[in-house]
């Protein structure tokens, strides 16, 4: 059963360029993942030979916590959800501007490839 709940696309537009959220561009240093959880490849998608890149936009707070995730490029609902579920568990050092932590919007690519 290759179904799943839709994930909002694109991410909450209220984040983009508003308030404390900044995009990663000089002089801002990107957040760095210090702990990652690999996504679980849903077995029904593996059997159906569905693969590809899911591109996410993560809102990373000044503390390095993930506050919001949206799907910029979808492959299939189940793979999108697996990517989001994994990235929600990641821990980051926050983005910085002039050495000070800032809240940022950060793109991540998750590759689901068949072995």
Image (spheres, rainbow, N blue to C red):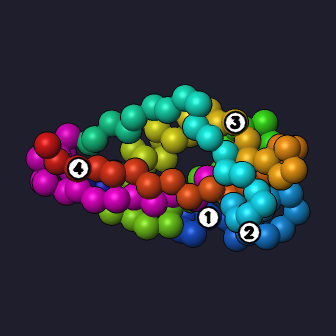
Q: Which residue is label 1 attached to?
A: 11
Foreground of the two, 45 or 107 = 107
Q: Which residue is label 4 attached to?
A: 113
Task: Quadrant for residue 22, please give it.
Answer: bottom right
Marks 2/1 in contact by CB < 8 Å: the verdict is yes
On whether residue 41 falls in the magenta region, the answer is: no
Using a 10 Å C-alpha cutoff, classify the residue at mark 4 as few (fewer than 14 neighbours), some (14 to 19) or many (20 or more).
few
Task: Quadrant for residue 12, please give it.
Answer: bottom right
Q: Position of residue 11 (x, y in %)?
A: 61, 64
Q: Position of residue 39 (x, y in %)?
A: 38, 38
Part of the protein shown in magenta: 43-60
Marks 3/2 in contact by CB < 8 Å: the verdict is no
Residue 93 - label: 3
Compared with residue 79, is residue 12 higher up or lower down, i.e. above or below? below
Q: Which residue is label 2 attached to?
A: 16
Residues at marks 3 and 2, CA–CA distance in whole angstroms: 20 Å
């Amino acid at each position: 059963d290759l179904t799943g709940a839709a994930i909002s696309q694109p991410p909450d537009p209220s984040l983009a360029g508003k308030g404390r959220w900044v995009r990663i561009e000089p002089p801002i240093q990107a957040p760095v993942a210090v702990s990652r959880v690999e996504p679980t490849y849903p077995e029904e998608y593996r059997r159906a030979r569905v693969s590809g890149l899911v591109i996410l936009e993560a809102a990373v707070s000044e503390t390095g916590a993930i506050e919001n995730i949206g799907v910029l490029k979808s492959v299939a609902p189940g793979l999108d959800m697996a990517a989001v579920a994994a990235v929600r568990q990641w821990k980051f050092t926050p983005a910085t501007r002039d050495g000070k932590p800032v809240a940022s919007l950060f793109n991540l690519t998750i590759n689901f490839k068949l072995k």
